[in-house]
């Protein structure tokens, strides 16, 4: 039998201690994988953003609106082949008071051309385009709230007062992970006319942001600069950037949270290493006499050190595998679907990636080996006479 094989079998000598340590490692690995999944999910929309879309918003802040006439000006900009616009509504269904979902007022004839990854049955899309009070809802939102095509919904908004009745004309799905499938889309004209009546502003005509699609992805940056120059001498100026940069700038508001999650995930691994190191140090002290016997019959100090390190590595690997076995179904079949259905605007895709899973298992094994460095060195430095006396 090899030394590593002996180290593996040696784990069975104190099964209770090994079990507790493995569970501790597993809990740490589950927490680590969950935190890394949060970071990956939060940044997935930016990472997988379309490279040929440019988003234009108010230069000061995203919450301030732009005149609708800017849409026509942007359409005439170089390299822009199509464009659309949208406005945040912030609606909810009074029948589902505690279920918030994103609600956007969009330009019906162009929005789903610019965002062609949103898939809607053609007949439903055609019905919606001709229904001024029509709505398109995401498949997850429809499943969660029980919406069906033909249902009548009365929306309310914290931004625009009053009741806003709409009819569900279609249900969409998505071909990419960047699109939240828990959003409701309705006609911008419907919102615009309603705001004019509510505020007695016959010329409201405001949009939240304008999205243009360029002819070549390489022209996105230059197009954004050109669009901003169009409005440099206007009262309302714009800030335009490609969709990836736009997503990154939005995530920048949460940079402190991301940094905190990074730090916490690192601390979790440090704690896991300390747990393993403590267990291995206890075992090495208890088996000092056995190490002395090994040295006496001809084994070298490096052999003893390898024995200790291998035992710790196997223990870390065991805990990592247990943690992975827990994390995979917990995230992909439990937490992930729940967050996508209830917080899709932040987590349109929340799944434990294989890369994160393998990273967690590998980290557990490697940190297990690292935790044994000091106990292994101490065991290898034992004098044979002193170690053998522990057996006598």
Image (cartoon, rainbow, N blue to C red):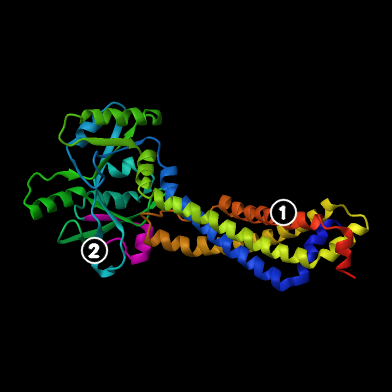
- Nearer the observer, 173 or 63: 63
Please identify the residue farthest to the right as the structure is shown. Answer: 297
* C-alpha separation, residue under disc 1 versus residue under disc 2: 64 Å
Residue at 15% from the left image edge and 49% from the top image edge: 192
Residue at 43% from the left image edge and 63% from the top image edge: 338
Q: Which residues are magenta?
A: 134-150
Q: Quadrant of residue 96?
A: bottom left
Residue 253 at least partly seen: yes
144 within the magenta span: yes
314 within the magenta span: no
Q: Is residue 323 left or right of residue 42?
A: right
Residue 41 at least partly seen: no
Q: Is residue 274 above or below residue 232?
A: below
Residue that numbered label 1 is attached to? 373
Residue at 16% from the left image edge and 32% from the top image edge: 234
Q: Quadrant of residue 386?
A: bottom right
Mark 2 lies on a secondary structure that is strand
**Quadrant into which the C terminus falls:** bottom right
Return the x and y of residue 70 as percentages of the image width and height: 19, 36
Mark 1 lies on a secondary structure that is helix
Q: Quadrant of residue 268?
A: bottom right
- Nearer the observer, 366 or 249: 366
Q: Earlier in the sequence, mark 1 or mark 2?
A: 2
Residue that numbered label 2 is attached to? 153
- Nearer the observer, 250 or 253: 253
């Amino acid at each position: 039998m090899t030394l590593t094989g002996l180290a593996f079998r040696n784990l069975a000598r104190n099964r209770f201690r090994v079990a507790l340590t493995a569970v501790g490692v597993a809990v740490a690995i589950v927490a680590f994988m969950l935190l890394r999944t949060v970071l990956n999910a939060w940044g997935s929309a930016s990472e997988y953003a379309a490279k040929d879309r440019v988003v234009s918003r108010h230069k000061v802040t995203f919450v301030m609106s732009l005149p609708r006439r800017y849409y026509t000006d942007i359409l005439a900009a170089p390299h822009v082949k199509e464009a659309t616009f949208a406005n945040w509504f912030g609606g909810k269904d009074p029948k589902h008071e505690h279920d918030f979902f994103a609600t956007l007022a969009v330009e019906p004839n162009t929005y789903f051309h610019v965002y062609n990854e949103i898939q809607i049955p053609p007949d439903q899309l055609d019905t919606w385009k001709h229904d001024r009070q029509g709505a398109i809802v995401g498949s997850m939102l429809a499943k969660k709230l029980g919406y069906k095509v033909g249902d009548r919904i009365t929306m309310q908004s914290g931004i625009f007062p009053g009741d806003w009745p709409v009819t569900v004309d279609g249900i969409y799905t998505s071909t990419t992970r960047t699109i939240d499938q828990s959003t409701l889309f309705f006609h911008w004209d419907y919102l615009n006319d309603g705001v004019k009546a509510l505020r007695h502003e016959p010329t409201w005509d405001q949009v939240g942001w304008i999205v243009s699609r360029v002819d070549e992805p390489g022209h996105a940056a230059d197009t954004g600069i050109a669009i901003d120059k169009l409005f440099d001498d206007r009262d309302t100026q714009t800030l335009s950037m490609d969709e990836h940069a736009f997503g990154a700038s939005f995530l920048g508001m949460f940079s402190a949270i991301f940094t905190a999650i990074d730090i916490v995930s690192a601390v979790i691994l440090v704690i896991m290493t300390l747990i393993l190191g403590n267990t291995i140090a206890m075992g090495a002290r208890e088996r000092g006499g056995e190490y002395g016997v090994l040295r006496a019959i001809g084994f070298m100090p490096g052999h003893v050190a390898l024995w200790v390190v291998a035992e710790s590595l196997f223990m870390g690997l065991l805990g990592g595998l247990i943690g992975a076995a827990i994390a995979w179904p917990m995230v992909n079949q439990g937490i992930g679907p729940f967050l996508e259905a209830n917080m899709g605007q932040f987590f349109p895709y929340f799944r434990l990636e294989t890369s994160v899973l393998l990273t967690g298992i590998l980290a557990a094994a490697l940190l297990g080996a690292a935790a044994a460095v000091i106990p292994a060195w101490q065991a290898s430095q034992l004098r044979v006479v002193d170690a053998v006396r522990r057996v006598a």
